[in-house]
Image (cartoon, grey):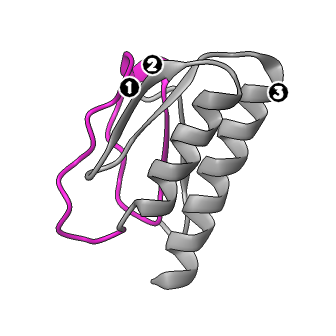
């Protein structure tokens, strides 16, 4: 659903912006792109650029996290995350 994908993208962008403001290291993994963890304004630009290019699709392979799962946040328009993630934001998932 387009609304759920948009909500997932907005949530991921907000989490990245909050991490950047705090000076925390953060990265991004999608089925199509991977941004290794880093910090600073350049990192936020890299993550937002990759996020803007992300394609949400049911047949996408699971993304490989850029850090140990327990340190990562799984943001999705609805696909189950599986065990071991630090936090999970699933838009429209039941």
Element type at mark 2:
helix
Looking at the image, do the residues carrying marks 1 and 2 touch, with CB atoms under 8 Å apart?
Answer: yes
Task: Kindly identify which residue carries mark 2.
Answer: 70
- Give x and y (percent) for residue 86: 52, 26
Q: Earlier in the sequence, mark 1 or mark 2?
A: 2
Identify the residue shown where x is 31% and y is 45%: 33
Looking at the image, do the residues carrying marks 1 and 3 touch, with CB atoms under 8 Å apart?
Answer: no
Q: Give 1 or 39, whichever is nearer the viewer.
A: 39
From the viewer's perspective, is 44 left or right of 17?
A: left
- Give x and y (percent) for residue 36: 40, 24
Q: Earlier in the sequence, mark 1 or mark 3?
A: 3
Identify the residue shown where x is 39% and y is 18%: 67
Q: Give 78 or 41, whichever is nearer the viewer.
A: 41
Task: Kindly identify which residue carries mark 1.
Answer: 84
From the viewer's perspective, is 21 left or right of 80?
A: right
The alpha-carbon separation of the residues under discs 1 and 3 comes to 26 Å
Element type at mark 3:
helix
Task: Kindly identify which residue carries mark 3.
Answer: 21
Residue 9 visible in the shown view: yes
The alpha-carbon separation of the residues under discs 1 and 2 comes to 6 Å
Magenta-colored span:
56-84
Main SS class of the magenta portion in the image? loop
Disc 2 residue crowd, few under 14, some 14–19, many 20+, Cα 10 Å: few
Q: Earlier in the sequence, mark 2 or mark 3?
A: 3
- Give x and y (percent) for residue 84: 38, 25
The alpha-carbon separation of the residues under discs 2 and 3 comes to 22 Å
């Amino acid at each position: 659903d387009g609304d759920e994908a948009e909500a997932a993208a907005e949530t991921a962008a907000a989490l990245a912006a909050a991490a950047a403001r705090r000076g925390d290291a953060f990265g991004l993994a999608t089925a199509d792109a991977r941004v290794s963890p880093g910090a600073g304004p350049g990192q936020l630009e890299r993550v937002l650029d990759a996020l803007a290019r992300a394609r949400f699709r049911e047949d996408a392979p699971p993304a490989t996290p850029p850090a140990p799962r327990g340190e990562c946040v799984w943001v999705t328009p609805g696909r189950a995350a599986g065990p071991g993630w630090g936090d999970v934001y699933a838009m429209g998932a039941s």
